[in-house]
Structure formats: C-alpha cells, structure tokens
Amino acid sequence: MALIAMTVAATNHYHPFVVATRNSTAFIDSLTVFNTFLGLIISFRLNSAFTQWRAGMVAMGSLSEAAREIVGSSCAYVSTMIKEELNNERKVEDTNDEAVSKAAERAGRTLEEEVNLDKKRKHLGQPIPRDVLEKCTFFTELRRLVFLYIAIVFHDCRGRDGIDKLKDSGVLTDAEYDELYACGSEHKKVVKDKESYRALVRRTPHKLRATITELWLKRLVQVAAKLGHLSPGNASGLQAKISQLPNLYTTVFNIANVPIPFNYMQYLQYLLSAYMLLYTFVIVPNSGLYTPIWVFLWGTFLFMADEVTMEIECPFGLDANDIDLEERLLQIEEELTVLIRSQYYFITGGASLSHIPQGSSESSWRRVPFAKLESKPELTNSFSFYQGRLSSNLTIGKQHQLPKISEFTALIQDPDRNKRSNITDGDYGSAGLA
C-alpha cells in the first residue's frame, strides 16, 4: 500500500488530479464512516481472538480433567477385595544371628544394613495373587492408554505425526502399532486431489489413531469387567466417561485448525486495503510526497493488529502467550502416575512399589524404598492386558511381576529446541508435540 501511495503522490505532484478534500465532503464523510466501521471490525476481530484463546485454555483444562477423572474413577471402582492375602513378611529381629553377621562381614556392610537388606529380599520374594496382578496391570494399562490419547491430541495440535516418538518412549507398544497398521491408519496413500476431504484425512491420521485408542480403552474396561474387577454399573460409567474424549478432541481440533472462516478473512483483508487506498486519496493533496510515510505507518498498525489476532486465536503454538503443551503433557503424566502409585500401594496392602523408577538424586520424590536392589526381569510379552497379556494358567506371581509404572518423559522435548527446528524445517503450522 505504501508503494501505491508513493505512485499516487508522485503522479499528483507533477500532474494534479486528486480533488482537494476541502472542496469535496464525499472523501471526508466516507473516511469518517470507514474509520468507525473498520474500528468496530477490528475490535470484534480482537475480541473473537481472545475468546478463541480462552476457549483453547478451557479445552486443554477439560481434557486434563477428563484424563484424571477416567483414571481416578477406574482406580476407585476396581474392587479392593484380595482373594488371597499376602504372606506376612518374616521379621528379622535377632541381630546376633551368626549367618547374618557373616554375610554382612563378607559384603562389607554393617549388621543393621544387612538385616534391612535381608528384609527387602524376603519382601520382594513374597507371592502376589493373580487378582492383585491383574488389577495392577489394569491400572498401568489404563494410565498408558489415556496418556496415549492425550499425546495424540497434542500431536495434532502441533501438526506433527509423532508416531515414532510414541513407539520409542514406550507409550505405544509394537503389538498396538501392528494393529494400527492393520486398521489402515498408518498407510501412506497417494491422493491426486490435494484439496479433497480424503486428502485432509490422510494428512492428519491423528483422528484415526485416537479412534482406535478409544476402542482400546473401552476394550480394557470391558476385560476388567469380565474378570470381575468392575461391576456392570461402574463399567458403564467408565465407558460413558471414555466416550466424552472424542467431544473434547473435536473441540481442541476446531480451535487449532479452524481459527477464522476463510471468507471472513478475505473480507477483512479487502476492507483494510480499500481503507488504505481511500486514506491515500484523502491526505495526498495536503501531505504531498509525505503521503507514503503516513500510509506506511498507519497500514503497519492496522495489518499488525490482524497478524496479532491470528497469533492469539490459536493458543497451541510456540509463542510466549501460547499454551505450553509439553508442560501440560508432563503435568498430566505426573498426575496419572501419582494416582497409580497410590492405587498400587492400596491394592497390595502396603507392599513394595519396587517397579517405580527411582530419581536421579537420593532426595528426589521419585525415590522408592527398595531402589538400591537390583531390578527383577519384567514381563516380556508385547501384548497389552486387554490383548491377553496375562496367562490364564497364572494363579500366583512374584513382586517383580507387578507391571512397571513407566515414565514417558522421553516423549517431551525442549520447547526452545522445537521452535528452532520448526523454523529450520518449516513444518509448523497453526495447528500439533514432537
């Protein structure tokens, strides 16, 4: 617009053709009406952008609350009756036991340390009823699948695929990926019409993945109900809570991908251009060759307001005022982990939580009572609980067979590094986590 204003100003300077505004009230009245109308339009645009931003914040909060509600309610609904009580741990009271003293001397430990270590070994060797093992497996699988669903939604908000990260971080198992591939969500199909709805679906497979994940969650609840860990009424309640996830996903998707109707966007750009053109002809008789400067300054202000609203209305970017999805994902993981840890402790009657990963420091809240003991081998079956992970012949297990409460923080990358990589690769849109 400044270039157009420069052309008009130069032409009018050497060959005056613009009617002086003091001789024509049409220019002045039109500009006054335009000022009022454009001011209302820009005010509405800014207000709608802030409304969209607030809606994004509310949607993220609702999604987090839904995840916490599903896991928390599931843990509370599961029957706490243990069919077979855990054997009481044999207490080692005799500190003068000769065998313990010799073992401590050989290992270079004090007698008290050897006694405590002996207690821990015996505690880990206690049998775990199948009932408890199934319940703990149900808790961990539910937490993982809910976290998987939330991660898929966040990936969609950032416009990234993220399937490899999900597999590498352990959120998605190999068997589940095979099922996704068999369902067709991971097929790379070539679509000729890039503007068709089919092309849009193929560019964003997150909806397909979320649909299958919802099925896994419902299947998991159904398996737990069939095994007698959930009553029919509680199972129906959980199914209803899980069915709310697609509605929240759709809300988040619309905020991230449909910030403003395209026709309205074109109309607003047309209004700004027409206003700046009228403004040029109004001021050129008096401003002369200085007209381009005024047009540039005023045009920068108006078009910048439009750009600011475009940044505000999508709250899932990498700007300072946007929602930090990585931080939200980490917070959701910690909330779900705390719930599962509490349920582990409760369902096992206060038994060891030896499969909670220990922290990097001794003072970390992640430290566990038996962290110094060597970890036991885990179940190696890649199938999940609802896919038949536990053998029907298994009637009793050991402490080390309790499923591990894994941490998925490897899924989260530093936002600053993400922003730099986005700028370099150019793969970031207004609508998606790495």
Image (spheres, grey):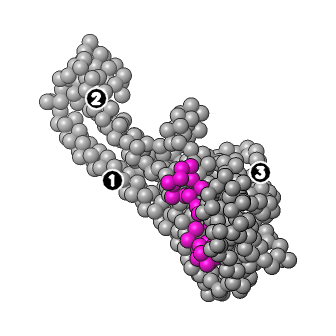
Answer with mark 2 or mark 1, whichever residue precedes in sequence: 1
The label number, if any, that marks residue 47 in the structure image:
1
Which image quarter: residue 111? bottom right
Q: Secondary structure at mark 2?
A: helix
Q: What residue is disc 3 on?
A: 187
For this orientation, the residue located farthest to the left is 22
- Please provide the residue range marked out in magenta: 341-369
Amino acid at the residue labelled 2: Leu
Amino acid at the residue labelled 1: Asn
Q: What residue is disc 2 on?
A: 297
10 Å crowding of disc 2: few (<14), some (14-19), many (20+): few
Camera sees residue 243: no
Q: Does 319 appear in magenta?
A: no
Answer with mark 2 or mark 3, whichever residue precedes in sequence: 3
Asked if residue 139 is positioned above or below residue 109 in the image, the reply reads below
Q: Secondary structure at mark 1?
A: helix
Answer with mark 3 or mark 1, whichever residue precedes in sequence: 1
The picture places residue 289, in percent across and down from the top left corner, at 25, 17
Amino acid at the residue labelled 3: His
